[in-house]
Image (spheres, grey):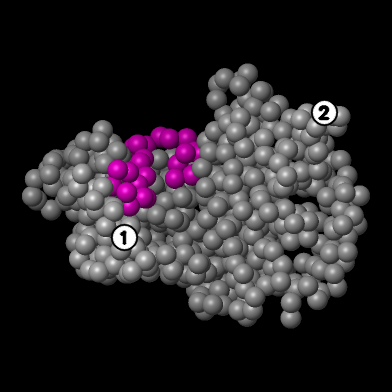
Amino acid sequence: MSRTTLPAWRALAALAPQHAAHRAPHGFLVSGAGLTLDLSRQYLGAGVLRPLEQLAVECAVAQRRDALLRGEPINVTENRAVLHALLRSGAAAPLAGVEGSAEVAAELDALRDLTDRIRGGRLRGLAGRPFTDVVAIGIGGSSLGPQLAVQALPKTGPRLHFVSNIDGAALEDTLAPLDAATTLFLVISKTFTTEETLTNARSAQAWLHARLGPDPVDAHFVAITARPAAVAASPVKAGQVLRFWDWVGGRYSLWSTVGLPIALSAGMAAFEDMLAGARAMDMHFRDAPFAGNLPMLLAAAGVWNRTFLGMPGLAVLPYAHRLARLPAYLQQLEMESNGKRVDLEGRALDYETCPLLFGEPGTDGQHSFHQWLHQGTSRAAHELIVVARPMSALGEHHDKLLANALAQADAFWLGRDNPDGHRHYPGGRPVSLITLPALDAFHFGALIALYEHKVFTQGVLWNINSFDQMGVELGKQLATSLAAAVRGEAAPPDHLAAYLSALRAMHVR
């Protein structure tokens, strides 16, 4: 049965043409896990909020949430449990009794031990010197989350570098200033078959041999995978192997041993604080009623703006330089999860789902695409993230940063009337304002978990599976089949013959 037949859905559809009359009241603030969400710049008056809450009831959001936290196999297309919350559950959290908790605790101990040995200089390379630089090789969820966290949190350990793209220039540029004798590589791949990751790892291995000699360089590699046996069978050998599990989705894997770059950069205590912050948001999501539940409200606002008000875009604007990679991380979390066109039963949807997500940190974006946000012919919704406490000793900078964030939020929402059309700002662009008291590990963890649960809730409201990613497979399959043709070892498809011939001519000039 289509969601469009639900009474609450029909009520919301009837309200949508008059949405401008349903502005939220001033001071519509809710808090949880240390974060505050300001929804007073949304079309979420009581007349809209009530049917949104009823829609959550009719879609069984609470029951699906509980199934998630019980570890049930809610990934129906792949018949898998979705247990990323188990990775941060601790002894007293919702998933403490789920089978696998002991294994998670053991692997966390292994992560802690390896982190201490690398940061303490006890784990060394061929030359017997401590590691000063760590290169994390992975792609997608094996890179985006750790990279975001390393940038966001204080750096107290070895220098971290990330290589994901299969373009060799990415690896060459990263390695150029490094000393092979003090460089450690983390090869992060769930299956240990990811082409981009293993290609980069083999080239890293060759780089080490060219500088350190022919002896095995296993001591310079740590593998992080759900398939340890694949490491043993790979030409890229690793002196250390950390494990995670098949039920850890890539975009949720930073809570697992995939978070080793975070622990190495910020310290194990910070990594565990990050887990604690996420756990606090898990508990808030589990326990808070709809009217005070941050993930549910943020999700409901997003569904209202996208599906009922027809806004095609969502601009995520972190007013914090250290959260500059947040939009890129959320592009995977949200669009890979909810960029779907069929429902749980595989039927084509007759309504819009996930918006196009984009963004840049403030104030940089104000000098580029904010023009489109303010005066473009389409409206986007906005999520602004601010931090209450200064993130540097330069206090004047933080005051101006915060003033700009609040100014943009008001300009998007309130606009400004002017008879000169060039200077008219229509306003009416909805804004959710998320505030962290500080950009520390705890509140960073809570922020990421907030977005995870927002995405899950929206998937339930849209009746889609947020935990598969079939759409990314076709391009990878075609690339594999075309590789021989690109190398000139096989005849190309007819439609590519002329292009590849021209490409080869350019290459030899």
Nearest the camera: 444 or 11? 11
Q: Quadrant of the C terminus?
A: top left
Nearest the camera: 89 or 505? 505
Residue 237 seen from this side: yes
Residue 130 seen from this side: no
Nearest the camera: 114 or 251? 251
Q: Quadrant of the N terminus?
A: bottom right
Q: Secondary structure at mark 2?
A: loop
Q: Are marks 1 and 2 in contact (CB under 8 Å)?
A: no
| Stretch in magenta | 147-170
Mark number, residue 235: none
* 332 in relation to 359, above or below: below
- Circle 2: is it few (<14), some (14-19), or many (20+) Cα within 10 Å? few
Position of 454 with respect to 114 (left or right) is: right
- Circle 1: is it few (<14), some (14-19), or many (20+) Cα within 10 Å? few
How many badges with numbers are in the image? 2
Residue that numbered label 1 is attached to: 498
* 62 in relation to 500, above or below: below
- At horizontal 8% and vertical 45% (from top left) the residue drawn is 213
Which image quadrant for residue 160?
top left
Mark number, residue 420: 2
